[in-house]
Amino acid sequence: MHIMEGFLPPLWCAVWYIISIPVIIYGIFKIKKVTEEIPDSKTLLAVSGAFMFVLSSLKLPSVTGSCSHPTGNGLGAVLFGPAAASVLAVIVLLFQAVLLAHGGLTTLGANVFSMGIVGPFVAWAVYKGITKANISSTIAIFFAAFLGDLLTYVATSFQLALAFPDPTFTGSLVKFLGIFAITQIPLAIAEGLLTVVIWNGLKEYRSKILSKLNLFSNKESEAI
Amino acid sequence: MDSKWNVVLIILVIILCIAPLVMYNGLGEDEGYFGGADGAAGDAIEETGYEPWFSSFWEPPSGEIESLLFALQAAIGAIIIGYFFGYWKGQKES
């Protein structure tokens, strides 16, 4: 999902920066608020950021015969909300843009929008929806991480189709979805499964904080 | 949930990663396989006649250095996760 340095026209770079910056600022405030209210949650924040670091560094092969990487954005989004995940995404994307020449500074706004805003928002909404329906948080976190990952790449495809509607927007969208989204399906499943592994650990050791962050379905809250 | 489930989940992830390697066994970069999707998107953009207007200040000078930095990224994340899970486990047991 990394749009490479210089691969978006300047106007689109500006548009995505303008959309992303307010969310990042809100995310910084949100992180401050949560960690002040629940100081123990700092360690969870570190683990969410670290999880994003690991997952986005793993370039995995996919059934389409090309390689791509998971995003790791679902966990942080579910724990701290989508805006907080956008702050974590900035850290990861800056590391990759500066040290690895993956993504770029001009395209940082656009890449934060897909990996730090669209994906996390989808993950957070899916998680809330499933747990509200009183279904187990383990199932919810799988679908949250799976869809958060997949929709990150769908968002990138939309961004590229908007910037390069060649010959038409739809034709271009189909082309970029073919490159990104289909490759991503098995990787998104892998990300869902790995997020469940971390989630199982958090449930075992940190269930009090998870419950303070209001993350369990009614049925699970009663069981604690 | 007990740790047996985690083993099952990790085995599933391994199967997902090995499947493409088996499906396209014998094919490599020269035949156009296992390249990065990000690069493929870059190529598709260049096909429209677009020329990038800015390039990275610094790029890893070789594939070796690039893999060094990717491994570093994974290691930083892994040590943080491992540190806290070990800490929590120890807390629980004492």
Image (spheres, helix red, strand yellow):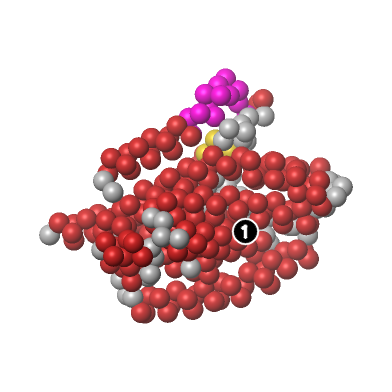
Left or right: where does residue A213 sit relative to residue A155? Answer: left
Q: Nearer the viewer, residue B43 or A193?
A: A193
For numbered disc 1, what is the local secondary structure?
helix
Residue A114's place in the image compared with B45, above or below, is below
Magenta region, main secondary structure: helix
Q: Is residue B27 magenta?
A: yes
Chain ID of residue with mark 1:
A
The image quarter in which residue A182 lies: top right
Residue B66 in the magenta stretch? The answer is no
Q: Position of residue A86 (x, y in %)?
A: 54, 65
Question: Percent position (x, y) of residue A212?
Answer: 33, 71
Residue A133, compared with residue A179, is above or below; it is below
| Depth check, front residue: B55 or B1 | B1
**Residue that lies at the very extreme toward the left in this rendered image:** B94
Position above or below: B11 against B81: above
Q: Residue at x 38, y 35 (%)?
A: B11
Say which residue appears at 51% left-offset and 28% top-offset: B19
Residue A185, horizontal then vertical, whole percent:
57, 42
Residue at screen point 68% across, 72% down: A18
Q: Amino acid at mark 1?
A: Ser
Q: Quadrant of residue A22?
A: bottom right
Which contiguous range is marked in magenta?
Answer: B17-29
Name the residue located 78 percent from the left edge and 57 percent from the top edge: A162
In this picture, is B92 found above or below A60?
Answer: below
Q: Which residue is mark 1?
A: A114
Pick the front one: A131 or A147: A131
Q: Is residue A122 left or right of residue B91?
A: right
| Residue A75 percent coordinates (x, y) | 44, 58
Q: Residues within 10 Å of mark 1 (few under 14, many from 20)?
A: many
Residue A112 visible within the image: no
Q: Is residue A153 visible?
A: yes
